[in-house]
Structure formats: structure tokens, C-alpha cells
Image: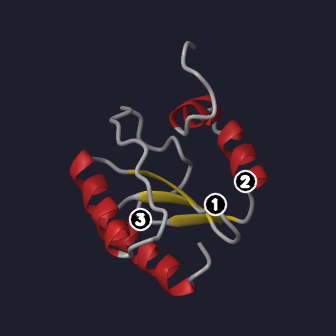
Amino acid sequence: MTSRRKIASIAKSAHRTSCAVLLKTGKPPGVMVAEAGSEGQLREWVGGVKRLRYKDYRLLRIEAVGNDGELGVASGCVKEMQSMKELSAYLDGRGILPWWTENMGFAQGGS
């Protein structure tokens, strides 16, 4: 995710749908993690991302988790990370790294 135009569109969509979004930008892979107050808001944000037509876009998971604010990003805002190491450390600090690694296919469930 290197296009500032597309990143700005993601941020605008996050603001419009009141989604909190983490982005791993820069060299591949680009990663987006989002949360919203409702599944409808999240699906609307995902629709906006799909319209950007990222070449290798894959939606890995949409799930209701029950706790708003897990990402530690204000609703309607975007937080950018520059590396996978930085993203992993941030998610670990929020206590959601095991969930993320499992849902990305990096680890097997069983916790």
C-alpha cells in the first residue's frame, strides 16, 4: 500500500463509516485491520476498499467481536504502521496478536 491517494480514500471511508482502522503501509504486504460499532458499518467500509481494486486484495475475516475499541484507534480514524514488526508489536500491546495471527493463517487455533 503505497498510493497516498488510495490511503486517503481508505481514511475518508473510515471517517464516513465511523470505522477504526490500522494500516500497514509501504512495501508489501499491505495490511488493513478495522473495527466498527456494527457489521453494517464494517461491510460498508469493506465495500469502499474493494472499489479501490487492489491487485492482490483478500478479505480474510469479518467477525463480530463484541468489544468496541480493541484496536485502540478512535472511531473514524486511521493509524498507519510502516512495518510488519511495528504492526505486530502494536497488536501484541493491545492483546490481540494471537487472534490476528490465527485469522491471518500464521498460527493454528486452539487457545
In this rendered view, identify the residue nearer to me: 96 or 59.
59
Q: Quadrant of the C terminus?
A: top right
Q: Which quadrant holds residue 3? A: bottom right
Q: Is residue 9 left or right of residue 7?
A: left
Q: Mark 1: which amino acid?
A: Pro
In this rendered view, identify the residue nearer to me: 73 or 29.
29
Q: Is residue 76 left or right of residue 81?
A: left
Residue at the location (27% across, 55% down)?
43
Q: Is residue 1 left or right of residue 43?
A: right
Residue located beneath label 3 in the image: 76
Say which label, 1 or 3, has the lower sequence index: 1
Q: Which quadrant holds residue 96? A: top right
Residue 17 in picture, x, y percent from top left:
30, 64
Residue at the extreme bottom? 5
Residue 94 in picture, x, y percent from top left:
64, 39
| Disc sitting over residue 84 in the figure | 2
Residue at the extreme left? 40
In this rendered view, identify the residue nearer to me: 41 or 58.
58
Circle 1 packing at 10 Å, graded few (<14), some (14-19), many (20+), is few
Residue located beneath label 1 in the image: 29
Q: Secondary structure at mark 3?
A: loop
Q: Mark 3: which amino acid?
A: Gly
